[in-house]
Image: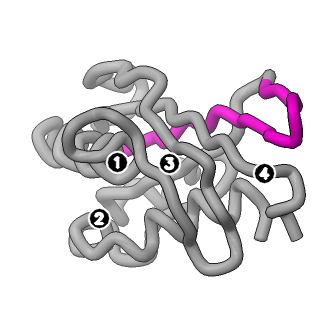
Amino acid sequence: MRDYQFVGHALLQTSAITALTSTRIYHGARLSSSALSAMPVINYYQLPGGTRRNGLESRTFTINCRDTDPAVARQLGDLVSDLFGGTSGTGVFGNSTSFTVARASVVRDNGTIPEWNEETFLVPVDVLVVYSMDTVS
């Protein structure tokens, strides 16, 4: 499993998130305007950078939570923060299928942003995933 697959898998295995999004969780660019009727939605992708050191790799992903209702977009952002940051904000550790996470944590919660060209609200949450380089298959 690759790091981006782990992020998607973790999101899709969280019932509180899929209760809102169903399977509308996508890796890569956000959907086109014609698909905005299917909300709420999450898209995520890797941000530039990352490091390899002492057998560990770290990557930062932005997880973009959208809905036409700012409260629902915010709720999704909070659920993502809890998933990757833990309910106490100290991060999470452990396994997910064949992917062993040394640590996942929230780098920053970027707030609720009204998207000027759409009638949607965006809550981007950046998460850091640290894992052993031999984890990736």
Q: Residue 108's x, y, as percent?
A: 42, 21
Which one is nearer the viewer's eye here, 40 or 63? 63
Determine the residue positioned at 34% across, 70% down: 14
Dot 2 or dot 3: first in sequence order is 2
Question: Residue type at mark 3?
Answer: Ser
Residue ID at (80%, 22%): 49
- For disc 1, the neighbor class at 10 Å (few under 14, some 14 to 19, many from 20) is many
Q: How far is mark 2 from mark 3, CA to CA?
A: 22 Å
Foreground mark, 4 or 2, reads 4
Image quarter for residue 101?
bottom right
Question: How far separated are the C-alphas under marks 1 and 3?
Answer: 24 Å
The residue singled out by tag 1 in the image is 80
Q: What type is the residue that disc 4 sits on?
A: Ser
The part of the chain drawn in magenta is: 50-65
* Label 2 crowd (10 A; few <14 / some 14-19 / many >=20): many
Residue at the image position 30 percent from the left and 37 percent from the top: 120
Residue sitting nearer the eye, 2 or 44: 2
For disc 3, the neighbor class at 10 Å (few under 14, some 14 to 19, many from 20) is few
Q: What element carries label 4?
A: strand
Q: Mark 2 points at which residue?
A: 17
Name which residue type carries label 1. Val
> On residue 132, which mark appears?
4
Q: Nearer the viewer, mark 3 or mark 4?
A: 4
Q: Could you tell me if the residues under marks 4 and 1 are in contact, i.e. CB atoms within 8 Å?
A: no
Does residue 58 belong to the magenta stretch?
A: yes
Q: Is mark 3 on a helix, strand or loop?
A: helix
User: Residue 33 — which label?
Assistant: 3
Instruction: Answer with mark 1 or mark 3, whichever residue precedes in sequence.
Output: 3
Cβ atoms under marks 4 and 2 closer than 8 Å: no
